[in-house]
Image (spheres, rainbow, N blue to C red):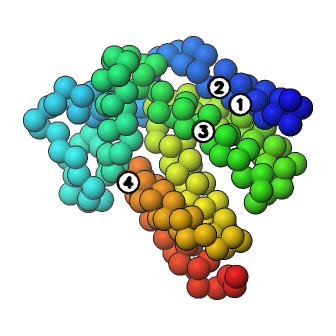
Amino acid sequence: MKKFGLPFLIVLIAAILRLWMLNAPDVHEDERHYIEDAQRLYNRDPYISVRYHARNHPEPSVGHPFLYQIEQAGLFKLFGLSVYTARLPNALSGIALVIVLLLSARQLGRRVAVLSAFFMAISSLTVRFSRNAHMDTVFALWITISALSIWRYLNGGKKYWLLVSGITAGLTISTKLNGVYIIPMIILLLAFVKK
């Protein structure tokens, strides 16, 4: 019980800080266009196009890929339109990020994994971004899983970790275009780190 008690408490703290009163305060201007895009997708607006090109895009999407808005629209279908639901992808990703860090105890060491997860759970910056309808926490989740998967592959040699890293790298890029920088990191690690 002691082995699982502290990790459970850390995840519980992360969940409370991210989910409690998620619908307050009012929508910030930076959140508005993501929520509007997701609402237009949810309503099957014929004038919105899901595009993945960095330039020559109409407003309001400001050049980001649409994976985050697709996630929001999916949650709108499940739970209905609300500010709470619009912010839910980030809140759940923030909780998942804490869990991923706890599950990485083999790579990081138990103490480092628990401390990392604890500080991720309570950090004011990560809590703030987990409580807004921005794509940054979802982006952080995918890039963390990708990096830890490469690390697992390099230390264990099981090729399915390469697949996990590749899929999550694709999800990283589909969430935010600057996620493309994970690709050179993966290539450099694979090229220069000896097994």
State how far apart marks 3 and 1 are (Cα): 9 Å
Give the image location of residue 144, x and y in percent. Answer: 60, 54
Nearer-N-terminus badge (2/4)? 2
- What amino acid does circle 2 point to? Ala
**Quadrant of the image occupied by residue 21:** top right
Residue that numbered label 2 is attached to? 15
In contact (CB < 8 Å): disc 2 and disc 4: no
Q: Nearer the viewer, residue 48 or 14?
A: 14
Residue that numbered label 1 is attached to? 11
Callout 4: SS: helix
At x 34%, y 38%, the residue is 69
Give the image location of residue 79, x and y in percent. Answer: 38, 18
**Quadrant of the image occupied by residue 76:** top left
Give the image location of residue 46, x and y in percent. Answer: 10, 35
- What amino acid does circle 3 point to? Ala
In contact (CB < 8 Å): disc 1 and disc 2: yes
State how far apart marks 4 and 3 are (Cα): 18 Å
Q: Nearer the viewer, mark 4 or mark 3?
A: 3
At x 44%, y 59%, the residue is 167
Nearer-N-terminus badge (3/1)? 1
Residue 169 as seen in the image, left or right of residue 6: left
Nearer-N-terminus badge (3/2)? 2
**Quadrant of the image occupied by residue 96:** top right
Residue that numbered label 4 is attached to? 174
Callout 3: SS: helix
Give the image location of residue 145, x and y in percent. Answer: 58, 54
Residue that numbered label 3 is attached to? 96
State how far apart marks 1 and 4 are (Cα): 27 Å
